[in-house]
Amino acid sequence: MEKKIFSDIEYNKYLNKKKLMGSKCKKCGSLFTPPRPICIDCYGTDMEWVEMKGTGKLAAFTCISIGPPFMIEEGFDRKHPYCVGVVELDEGTKVDARIEGIDPARPETIKVGMPLAVKYLHRKKKGEKLTYLAFEPV
Ligand SMILES: [Zn+2]
């Protein structure tokens, strides 16, 4: 696959293209999402980009009523909370993501273990195209 450095910038460029990428250690096969330049299992640095299927299950979540300024700008507040979670991908790695398609005002309806699929949230900030990783129930 392409020889691109394993950075957040490259990872975000892939997200812009609707690709959820991880890095795989060529030595021991360990997978990382978001991608890491160095394998934490064998300290190998021979990594390759791999595309993840984008499906998994909810491992943990929290609903946030008082978010950081960029979330408040998107219209989230005490009356309109949002949900973030940790998603365990089918490949076995975990990613942090926004959880959409659920009711953050009723966290009791959100279940750990529920199957999720990736969704890309495109935003424009100061003319720059940004893509946030999100998941929604399947
Ligand atoms: Zn390794």
Image: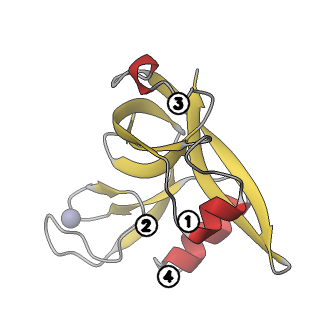
The label nearer to you, 3 versus 4, is: 3
Distance, label 1 to label 4, CA atoms, is 12 Å
Could you tell me the amino acid type at mark 2?
Glu
Mark 3 or mark 4: whose residue is earlier in sequence: 4
The residue lying furthest to the front in this view is 79
> Which disc, if any, is residue 48?
2
Tell me the element at label 2: strand
The residue lying furthest to the right in this view is 127
Give the residue drawn at x 39%, y 32%.
Answer: 58
Distance, label 2 to label 4, CA atoms, is 9 Å
Does residue 11 appear to the left or right of 73 in the view shown?
A: left
Mark 2 in CB contact with mark 1 (< 8 angstroms): yes
Give the residue drawn at x 14%, y 64%.
Answer: 41
Q: Position of residue 92 (x, y in %)?
A: 31, 40
Decide: is 39 above or below 113: below
Distance, label 2 to label 3, CA atoms, is 40 Å
